[in-house]
Amino acid sequence: MVIESFSNPKYKYLLSLSKSKTRKKDGVFLMEGRPELDLALRCGHQPQMVIYCEAYILWQAIEPMLGNARPQVVALSKALFDSLSYQNVPNNFMCVFPAFSVSLDEMQVNGPTVVLENIEKPGNLGAILRTCDALGVKNLIVTESLVDLFNPNILRNSRGAVFTTQCVFTTNEKALAFLRAHHKSIYCAALSQESTAYNSVRADENTAFVFGSEAKGLSEFWLGHADQCIIIPMLGEVDSLNVSVSVAIILSHHLNQAAQV
């Protein structure tokens, strides 16, 4: 049966998953987009619910993708589906997945680590996750942040990298203890006259790159524990870059540098 009413309880529940409060209370999140969903299913995440609209895709096309999963199936009218979706395009559908989390103890010890302190904009975190996946960085630590990993802006901007990158939310103190326990050098991106140009220093695969928020930069906590402070020289009139762009530039340079050794 196709749900057509905007007052339908199931539709209202799906709509409420745009709010962090509902997602956290029920331990689930709503996701759409074929690259993202295809990656989630390939990584073994099984949906609790599949939502589709025959104007975009038939159930017979979705079912083979689900393997052994037996989710609840919800068919919506085009009007209801469009009101929930950001991508009203052919072959799109949505899934409700169980939320998941990773602890510091579960993180991979080998390879570079990215630390983000007090990140505020979900879209930036999503873009950084996507960059980490593209560059093969598996460890991302987010400290002192209230951002919800399953915010729709993060899911969209990550293009599914939430499923391939280990993202831990923790405190500054616990993050530092993890880095020190695994003997990682700490390179802090900081707008400071004492900072060294990022492309004039050498980092190895056991380096942690630490970035702060665009509004406040890094706190004294990280600056006080830095082994090296680095900066991207600005040749124009503006004094800084979007944090996701800064992460991409610095990571790309140092990982390419390490690969050439």
Image (cartoon, rainbow, N blue to C red):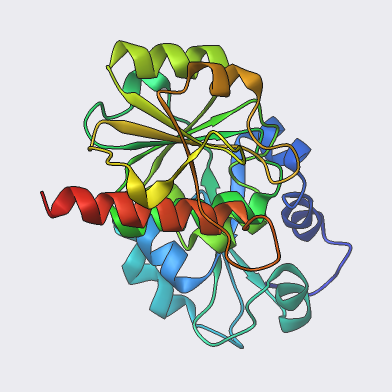
Residue 102: x %, y % from top left: 43, 29
Mark yes or no: residue 187 visible. yes
Locate residue 170: give its quadrant: top right
Residue 206: x %, y % from top left: 25, 31
Furthest toward the right, the residue is 7
Q: Residue at x 55, y 72 (%)?
A: 93
Q: Which of 183 and 24 lies nearest the eye of the viewer?
A: 183
Residue 202: x %, y % from top left: 27, 41
Q: Which of 19 and 98 lies nearest the eye of the viewer?
A: 19
Q: Residue at x 77, y 57 (%)?
A: 15
Furthest toward the left, the residue is 261
Mark yes or no: residue 41 visible. no
Residue 169: x %, y % from top left: 54, 28
Q: How many marks?
A: 0
Q: Is residue 139 positioned above or below 96 on the image?
A: above
Furthest toward the front, the residue is 193
Q: Residue at x 40, y 79 (%)?
A: 61
Locate residue 224: give its quadrant: top right
Q: Is residue 58 positioned above or below 117 on the image?
A: below
Q: Is residue 183 positioned above or below 96 on the image?
A: above
Q: Residue at x 64, y 20 (%)?
A: 220
52 vs 14, left or right, is left
Locate residue 31: give its quadrant: bottom right
183 vs 130, left or right, is left
Quadrant that contains the N terminus: bottom right
